[in-house]
Amino acid sequence: MALEDAFAGFTRRDWERDSPDGIVRLAIVGIGGFARNRALPAVAEGQYCTTTTLVTGSPDRARSLAETYDVEHVVGYDRFREGEHADAYDAAYVATPNATHGEYAIAAAEHGKHVICEKPLETTVERARDVVDACEDADVILMTAYRLQTEPAVRRSRELVRDGVIGTVVQVHGAFSHPLLDHAGPDTWRLDPELAGGGALVDLGVYPLNTIRYLLGCDPTGVYASTHSSGGPFATVDEHVAFQLEFPTDATASCTASFDAHASSQLELVGTDGKVAISSPFGGVVPQEMVVESGDVRSEYTGPPTDEVREQFDYFGYCVLTGTEPGPDGEDGVADLEAIEAAYESAETARRVSIGERDRDFDGEPSV
Amino acid sequence: MALEDAFAGFTRRDWERDSPDGIVRLAIVGIGGFARNRALPAVAEGQYCTTTTLVTGSPDRARSLAETYDVEHVVGYDRFREGEHADAYDAAYVATPNATHGEYAIAAAEHGKHVICEKPLETTVERARDVVDACEDADVILMTAYRLQTEPAVRRSRELVRDGVIGTVVQVHGAFSHPLLDHAGPDTWRLDPELAGGGALVDLGVYPLNTIRYLLGCDPTGVYASTHSSGGPFATVDEHVAFQLEFPTDATASCTASFDAHASSQLELVGTDGKVAISSPFGGVVPQEMVVESGDVRSEYTGPPTDEVREQFDYFGYCVLTGTEPGPDGEDGVADLEAIEAAYESAETARRVSIGERDRDFDGEPSV
């Protein structure tokens, strides 16, 4: 691939090979800040999904939100689990605290609904595996909401890597920090290890972890991690984490995440013949600025603004409408939890922890 | 410090507090590519040093080089050790393969000459300690040639960090890769572990290692490292290394180095209130491009071109003329070797290795 070709049609939806009819009706389960501010508008703006149902612990307070987005039903969690209004939606978007993902995803699957579930898929490998099994048993589609996998800068980077434009990837650096308490109180569920499953690694580190696995097209075989906490509101979780992944190709990934640092994110892959860097990839609004070097050629590119959340829901809707297995499926979510559990074990034991080699399809493309 | 002040007088020599008379006469010991192409011109262009003697295994072949730079004497290694023409120089710049640094540095010290020695100071902590001891016994100045410590972008970054412009440093990323065989044959001493003391970690990884120690003003207390080699010319050394340093402040540094990847280097420090990034800091010609964020303020700065090698030799000459202990002294070189030995132990044992806490002056400034 010539370097210029990578940037031609930067925002092209390479996954969109058909023009399916119909629309996927969504129940949004858990309407916290991200669901309200990003998911609802993105679904409304997108092509293949529409929101018909809101599921919340405070239905009364959600009426005006429902009105704004022309949503037919608002139900509480218990009635959602019981299947009330289940004929009004085809799929559920689960955006509740991590430790409750399983219960709502499995309930949706048992009602025969497809599922798109926020990352991490659950708080442990075992619980995430239960979600995967339930969706398999129900024969419904399960997508883990790794929106970066539908982000144009990331998809173009993956093509560059796959086509050998930077040679064999040797070393990767990924970082994501975000001052949590600037945007949430100290009682946020993200600082409750029971509800979150961990701290900065689970909430932020999963972004470089998943994105690097996606870009390299393989799973890490080992990890070393060190975690730090200054106490106070961060006493029971990792406030900061640094982890180093080893891949079967001998590539390494040096990653960091922090709940209590200046907002910043970066991703850089260096290969035998070049490098790819994406500016601020993980913060939710990607400036679409990339630097690619291939041999002696250096290219700086800024793509048009793209709403990665809209892309994600359109991708999910497309998969449901066409019966396509999503790239970021349930196994993808399980794989990250395997790495996360290994990383926490490493942080406790101060040694490298092996991650079992797994046999999964890494195509990341609808197999149409 | 206001952000703008950091960039005012970007190339100022904050270490230059006097205007000493005189000039330091140098013997350059080992005239490989770097000595010929960078050191000799830099010394000639600089203010406080002059080259009077070349020391080489092939004196006849060095005559024209000596003529070009108006160098009085060319001697072989044995005669240098014996002290021939010792009255023609005040100091020796040792730029031979790593495992021979000690023998020439110690010979120079024993003749009462000051020493500036390329990094790493030697191939082991023990041998480096012998160099430090010899220079102490002879009461001569010993500087380890960490030229980055005289690089304006690095010195300005250190001021920003020290003055709290980015808050407390939380996480650092440093990377340096260089395709060695594009510039050297497979028989280069850099791939001989006996002569080099290691591979990519020793030759390239020492740059982020030392620069990060300098910027943070403290020593790592632990390290985890993984090394890889694809065999062939890299069979006996680390072709690639990834290492993660832990500092007593709880900051971490995620570092990589590679002998066999696209030429690239980067350095980024994220703190509680901002970040500092230096573009391509380690390749020998720094573009002086920095990005600094402090709170909500973001600043991109490009400083004027500066020859860091000239800065280094002028700094050394200044220290000798004023009787000032250099910032990058012998202990600084020993400290990196302690981290390097610990990293290699970690790579063998797959566990975190502690690095003994050391009591050293990290002022990095001439204590005038």
Image: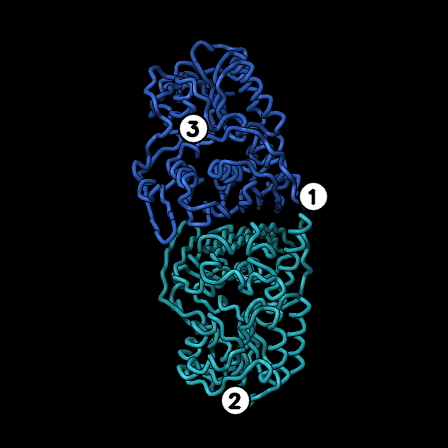
Chain colours: A blue, B cyan
Q: Quadrant of residue B98?
A: bottom right
Residue A101 is situated, as x and y percent measured from the top left of the image, at 55, 24
Mark 2: which secondary structure? Answer: helix
Relative to B294, A234 lies left or right? right
> Which residue shows up at 60% across the image and 50% down it?
B226
Q: Quadrant of residue B306?
A: bottom left
Residue beneath label 3, please? Answer: A365
Observer-nearest of B272 and B195? B195
Gap in angstroms between the C-alphas marked 2 and 1: 58 Å
Residue beneath label 2, please? Answer: B88
Under mark 1, the amino acid is: Thr
* Disc number for residue A115: none
Query: Can see residue B327?
Result: no
Under mark 2, the amino acid is: Ala
Residue beneath label 1, please? Answer: A349
Q: Residues within 10 Å of mark 2 (few under 14, many from 20)?
A: some
> Which residue shows up at 67% across the image and 70% down it?
B127
> Are callouts 2 and 3 both on one chain?
no
Write down the chain letter for disc 1: A
Residue A343 is situated, as x and y percent measured from the top left of the image, at 62, 40
- Tags 3 and 1 touching, CB below 8 Å: no
- Tags 2 and 1 touching, CB below 8 Å: no
